[in-house]
Image: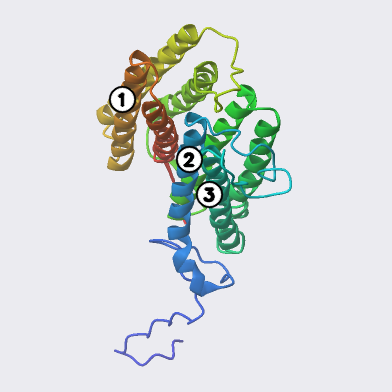
Amino acid sequence: MSSTPAGTAATPPTTPLTAPVSPGPRGPAGPAPRWPGLRRWTRAVLVANLVVQIGIVVTGGAVRLTGSGLGCSTWPQCEPGSFTPVLHEATTWHPLIEFGNRTLTGVVGIVAIAVALLLLTDTRRSRAYRRLGAVPLAGVVVQALIGGVSVLLHLDPAVVGVHMLVSLGLVAVSTVLLYRWSEGDGPVRPVVGPRARATGQALVAVAVVLLALGVVVTGSGPHGGDEEVAYRFEVDPVLIAKLHAAAVWTFIGVLGALVVGLVRDAAPARPRRAAVVLLAVTLAQGLVGYVQYFTGLPEILVGVHMLGAALLTASLAWTVLTLRERSW
């Protein structure tokens, strides 16, 4: 028999003071992680991580477009016997630009360390998500090594191209980390039909080809990263640019089919908004690409195009993630 007196409402159990703090708008019921006071900064750190990963693409492009790729003649030192540029009367601005980019890599590394510490120690989240938090830090190490190899091989276009593709991969991972922070670790549940999901997968496949061809276009063009070292891919730059343009139009066609399908099927607002934003980014990127092609590849437009590639990568990752959800 119940011991509660008749006519008296039962008192609901109180929430213990040690209950875990929610990482986002909702929170899982798991053991409290270490350093709970720092958890409120996790989302800000993940935003900063995405920003610096995109920023390093832009500054790396600036190194290349100003001919400063060999401003530091060796690696990991800038000059033999010195980690900083050696200034003298004949010093140009190239060593300063290259050294500045290397210094910014240190900033990216610090943010990546913060991401790894905050996510790897967050025992409320799934093991897979926590391990993903270590990818930006591992990527910084890999990128430093690739950058060093590119200098030692005098800006071989294949190595420089890999450098760019890894950067775009880190932008995608950083986007996933930020998006996943505000959702749970439960099973994936589609929020759109199978046709839209298949279209999203096709969009990713076309994007991989598109970005890879973009790297080849850059590797066959005039901006080799140094005013004296001019080794480029031995391909017809006009032909490869046309293939890249064909991939862009294919991407736009698949993306258009996705947008139409989401609207026709009355999909939730989030994937529809994300797909429209991705379409706007893609059209802007295509416009910049055509303008730079017909104006002789001016450095500033090539730099804008590299920024656009990073933004397109982030927007694509975000759009694909909106096609499904995870519960707590």
Decide which of 309, 150 is in the foreground and name it: 150
Decide which of 99, 12 is in the foreground and name it: 99
Mark 3 and mark 2 residues within 8 Å of each other at the beta carbon: yes
Separation of marks 3 and 2 at Cα, in angstroms: 8 Å
Decide which of 168, 304 is in the foreground and name it: 304
The residue sitting at 46% across, 8% down in the picture is 238
Residue 276, above or below 140: above
Q: Is residue 117 visible?
A: yes
Question: What residue is pinned by disc 2?
Answer: 59
Q: Mark 2 or mark 1: which comes first in sequence?
A: 2
| Mark seen at residue 30 | none
Separation of marks 2 and 1 at Cα, in angstroms: 23 Å
Question: What residue is pinned by disc 1?
Answer: 283
How dense is the environment of label 1, judged by Cα within 10 Å: few (below 14), some, or many (20 and up)? some
Residue 8, above or below 252: below
The amino acid at mark 2 is Thr
Question: What residue is pinned by disc 3?
Answer: 104
The residue sitting at 50% across, 21% down in the picture is 218
How dense is the environment of label 2, judged by Cα within 10 Å: few (below 14), some, or many (20 and up)? many
Q: Mark 3 or mark 2: which comes first in sequence?
A: 2
Dot 3 falls on a residue whose secondary structure is helix
Indicate the position of residue 173 as horizontal and vertical percent values. 53, 43
